[in-house]
Image (spheres, helix red, strand yellow):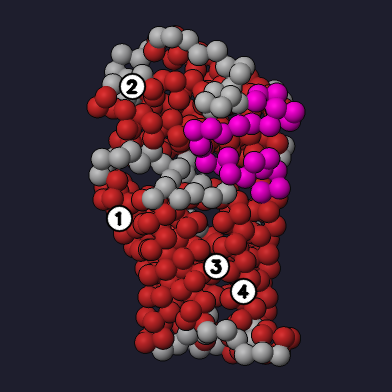
Amino acid sequence: MKPLVRLLFVGLVLPATAFAHAMSSADQQAALAGGNLEYIRLGAVHMLTGYDHLLFLFGVMFFLTKFGEIVKFITAFTLGHCLTLVFATLLHIRANYFLIDAVIALTVCYKAFDNLDGFRKWIGVQSPNLLGAVFLFGLIHGFGLSTRLQQLPLGHDGLVLRILSFNVGVELGQIAALSVMLLVLAQWRKTASFAKFSGVANVALMLAGALLLLMQLHGFQHTKFPEDLVPHDDEKHHAAEHKAADSVQGHSHSTKVPGSVAEIWQAIATRQDQLAKTLRAQNLDDAHDFAFAIRDLAQALAAQAPAAQKPAADSAAKTIAALAVAIDNTSAADAQEATEANARALDGAIAALKTLFPLSP
């Protein structure tokens, strides 16, 4: 029964903390200050805390016993997620991360359904080619990893090596996770409870995927403009909902941008203080106004960065813009803790941007 309890814990408890899967402010600062080894570490940690990826891998491994079969399926999954992780990031291909994570949750449900022989029992057809499905799902999981990697200030110089370093970390994390899974499953198969409870375990796995799906769809539902989860130069905010309509250039009509760098920094500090007071008062209605004002100011600041720091400043400004949109999403969903976490990440991203301006206050 113990393995079953662990599976139920994964299915019912871990999804409640799935939003921790995003890049934190500490991750963003470490990415700016660290080298390629830091990206390897971030990749490994991200895989090991990616409950959706781990649940899918657990489903794939559940009934595999032969070493050759394990290698074949893991290679297909690895090849798939490496392709989209590298190329989507390199080509700056982005999508609503709530929607991508919802599709990833569906892959967990699919594998659990397949493990239960659901295609034959309830649909009356043979299961689709599993190797092809695992490769296809690997592509989807890789795109999800790419959306998270693009939350970091990647810059331009050495971009390919940073992407590859993150990917190496993901693979190292995957190897560590698979090692534990193989050990647990090998030991469980030796007991009588495996045959008795394997079906229940896969029902729990499907339930975990369904809970993750509902969480991500809830986040997607509260996204007024899904494409704005990542910043675009011409992004606009819904005026009727948020009273902060953007101009064609991407700056809010309500944000007055000062002329000098020092004055911009002072304006950012003022908005940070206003955002913090709003959150302490648990008044989420105004949080997005201050977040988007900070976004506009950061974009103006990046435009004045010295030439040598310009790529890194632009990347940091994009991170701030993405976090402003995240604050908008979580505040619209009345999610106090998630909004506070995004605000802390925003503070970290601003601190990282400030390192590029030696004379900043």
Q: Is residue 220 visible?
A: yes
Neighbours of disc 4 within 10 Å: few (<14), some (14-19), many (20+):
some
Q: Secondary structure at mark 4?
A: helix
Mark 1 surroundings: few (<14), some (14-19) or many (≥20) residues within 10 A: some
Extreme-front residue of the structure: 248
Examine the rendered structure and indicate whether residue 210 appears above or below residue 283: below
Instruction: Report the Cα–Cα distance between label 3 and label 4.
Output: 11 Å
- The residue drawn where x is 39% and y is 24% is 302
Mark toward the viewer: 3 or 4: 4
**Disc 1/disc 4 C-alpha distance (Å):** 29 Å
Q: Which residue is mark 1?
A: 164
Q: Is residue 141 left or right of residue 67?
A: right
Marking on residue 277? none
In x, y percent, where is residue 137?
A: 51, 69
Is 170 on the left-hand or right-hand side of 138?
A: left
Q: Which residues are magenta?
A: 220-245
Residue bearing mark 3: 55
**Residue 61 in magenta stretch:** no
Mark 3 vs mark 2, CA separation in Å: 43 Å
Q: Mark 4 = which residue?
A: 110
Element type at mark 2: loop
- Residue at the image point whose x is 42% and y is 60% from the top: 84
Q: Closer to the N terminus: mark 3 or mark 4?
A: 3
In the rendered image, which residue does mark 2 sit on? 305
In the rendered structure, are the residues bearing label 1 and label 3 in contact, judged by CB atoms less than 8 Å apart?
no
Can you say which quadrant of the picture contains the C terminus? top left
Q: CA distance from mark 1 to mark 3?
A: 24 Å
Q: Foreground residue, 189 or 125?
A: 125
